[in-house]
Amino acid sequence: MTRFGAVYGERLLVDVFGSFALLLAFICAVYAFVGGIFAIRTRHPLLIKSTRQAGMATCGLIFIATFSLVYLFFSDSYWVAYVVAHSNRDLSTFYKISALWSGQEGSLLFWSFLLAIYVFSALFAYRNKNGELMPYVGVVLAGVQIFFLTLNNFVASPFKVLASPAANGALEIYTRADGNGLNPLLQYPEMVIHPPNLYSGYTGFAIPFAFALGALLARYPGEKWIHLTRKWTMIAWCFQTAGILLGAHWAYAVLGWGGYWGWDPVENASLLPWLTGTAFLHSVMMQEKRGMMKVWNVWLVFLTFMLCILGTTLTRSGIVSSVHAFAQSSIGNWFVGFLALILVVCFAAYVKNRDYLKSENQLDSIVSRESSFLFNNLILLVSCVAVLSGTLFPVFSEWVSGSRISVGTPFFNKVNIPIGLLLLALTGLGPLLAWRKTSTESLKRNFAGPLIVSLVGGAIFFALGLREFYSLICIILCVFVAATIAMEFYRGTRVVHARSGLSWASSAVDLTLRNTRRYGGYIVHMGMVLIFVGLAGAAFNKDVQKEMKLGSTLQIGRYNLLLQSFESHPEKNYTAERMIIEVSENNKPKMMLYPERRFFPTNEESGTMVAIYSTLRDDLYVVYSGQSPDGQTPVIHAYLNPLVKWIWLGGAIVVMGTFVALLPNRRTVLALASTTEPAAVSELGTVLAPSRAVTLREGHD
Amino acid sequence: MKKQAKFGIGIGVIVVSMGFLAWLGYGESKTYYHTIAELSTLQGDARAHRIRVGGTVEPGSIHRSQGRVDFVLDGEGKQLPVSYVGSDPLPDTFIDKSQALVEGSLERNGSFTAQQVQAKCASKYEAAPTADPPAKTAGASAASEAAPKSSM
């Protein structure tokens, strides 16, 4: 499929432009890599500067290539194969953007694009700092970019054009009148936001990876590279969390099977780096405060990045069958090769420089902050191993025994539910344990209150009828963690309030802004508590399926559904068949729901529009499943799913908490309340005398 | 050494109990993948396992009746009659000629009772046995089209 020797006609050559930009990006990345290695060895300032600029130029060229592809979509360029495959003239603007990542080639370019944003930001932000470390970081990042650019240029190019032999034997480019359109299952808002968030999470972990590997190769002081990468890790983690939750929401609200997580290999692939990334986020605190876990941290971040690559391998290669990808694609081999290369390089770097990773301290006591981090990491890793084994089981079992054996939800849930509960318990315990060793008095002071509150809460729920073992434990722990967080905020706010005279609300805000990492972290933990509450509801899901003639009713829980009528109407690129249902709660009419099925003539496919009425208590989730076998009666499937809304709310709070934690600490001097009288400028010096000003010391994390 | 022992025990307890739960979960959910051709060769215990089979839905074979959906899967030149008895609605992509993966058990008479069905639309871009316009869709690889999130 070569363009050389073909006839161009009068097209604006944006696809040629884009593919040249990609090729130049590849060349720049190679220079950044090779030149970067020489820059490290020779320390020549010109080499250092030019390789850094080449790294930035690589990113700029990738941006240009991506915008070219986007332009091709918007200008309806139906001589480009990728545009033909994923778009058509009728497609709305919103979805023409998302068509960019709806196929293999485009989504790989999108990966490069997001990675380039991170790489550019890192190279630019540190262009005049950390001169000892940055050349190494630049080389690692260039190496990663070279891999993806190889795919973009030579293996899966998005700029291929349609051509067929003309009468004279030469290949002639032809243009289709219209494209094939976007898969209707992708024409939902979630499809527009879920991949960008998730990919931003995956690609974002390349930065901490590059810093860790670079620091190891450069023998750069441990605390410094950890301090540098902290914010990048939090950003990547935040995107990963949002991406996973958006994916779950998409599965729930769009796919219509009533659930949000199926332990499907592709879902698991996004969870794996999140598990190790969360472990890393926590254990770096050990290294910062006590100089411990250095080897562990380095391998955690290596593992996280490798799991990101594994994640995308699993999704694209089809080595494990999934609802998301059945086909075998040879692109998987490239990723497996890259993964092997990363492992070899990391291992070699570790073996060479491991003496620089010696711990400065030992674990003193099992009742300490360090110990809780250790168990946090252990649990997250056990979960990661379990999910990884379960996901790859078919592959391993085939190697070992010849038959492909897969495991399903019972396996994943049996292991991950207890792990989740243990993690929840640690979330409450950890922040209140002291470094090194916690005294018994401190234990009593910190935990007596929350423990009592949580047991009381558990007793109340038990009395109200909650008997399911795990759900009861979950609720007790959720109350426990919430109580510890509330206590922490209360204690800190009380101090600020007493010293400054600000209102309670302002004091709480001030407290948070003075130690954003700690209190932002508490907000994130609170969000996780809400998510666990939401997850606990799943044990009580109910559903009813019924063939409903017009005018008949369906009862589920306290809701009664009456099928009033149905209608069918054509839209721009589909025909919709919609049910009109009146919902009554405890016999009082409450609202209308419109579950729908859409038929897309272009692709001969149909899609479901679920109707959801979501409250904090539960979701009423109604699906129009189609017609009965004899074709006369619509079939309605209604679900009552308790507490699902808590998951999405919790997710929003987790994201907000991460934003707070990313803010720089407020460092102003806090004056005492009595000094705020209006005073003439010349008297200001005496009014704000240093002895009467109070500075809150930054609390330890 | 005492604190080492405490940590060791704590770690050990967690790992062992998780391992035990994993083993239980494995027993409860392990599913063997077989091709349609292999099914007829299965003997004894192998016939009683949970099985997963993939194939293409034979056009015109989908019959919906009360509480079940019957259809025929083609694969490797053989055919397998399937009855889906699960309560979840069949996926929207489950139509004639789609690629389907069914999970369930093999009956005595050689037919298959499915508890779960997954389906993917047959890609429009795989070369048909008859000649297609050459190099027409060079960019569109077979893997990436119809399945919802296959691009990621």
Image (cartoon, coloured by chain):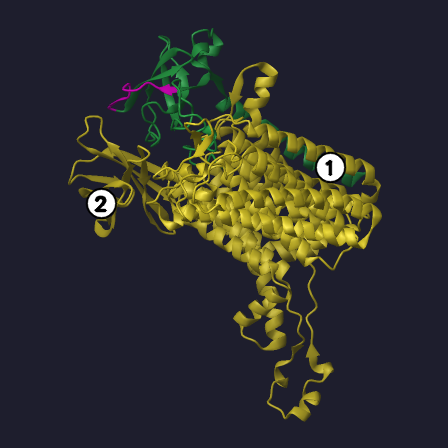
Chain colours: A yellow, B green
| Element marked by disc 1 | helix
> Is A439 or A118 nearer to us in this picture?
A118
Question: Is the C-beta separation of discs 1 and 2 under 8 Å?
Answer: no
* Residue at numbered disc 2: A581
The chain under label 2 reads: A
Please tell me how crowded label 1 is: few (under 14), some (14-19), or many (20+) other residues with Cα within 10 Å: many
Residue A74 falls within the magenta-colored stretch: no
Tag 2: amino acid: Ile
Observer able to see residue A477: no
The residue that appears at 64% across and 85% down in the rendered structure is: A675
Residue B12 image offset from top left, x and y in percent = 68, 33
Image coords of residue B75 (percent x, y): 41, 15
Q: Of the residues under marks 1 and 2, which one precedes in the sequence?
A: 1
According to the picture, the residue beneath numbered tag 1 turns out to be: A346
- Disc 1: host chain: A
Horizontal and vertical percent position of residue A631: 19, 29
Outermost residue toward the front in this view: A168
Q: Give the range drawn in magenta.
A: B56-66
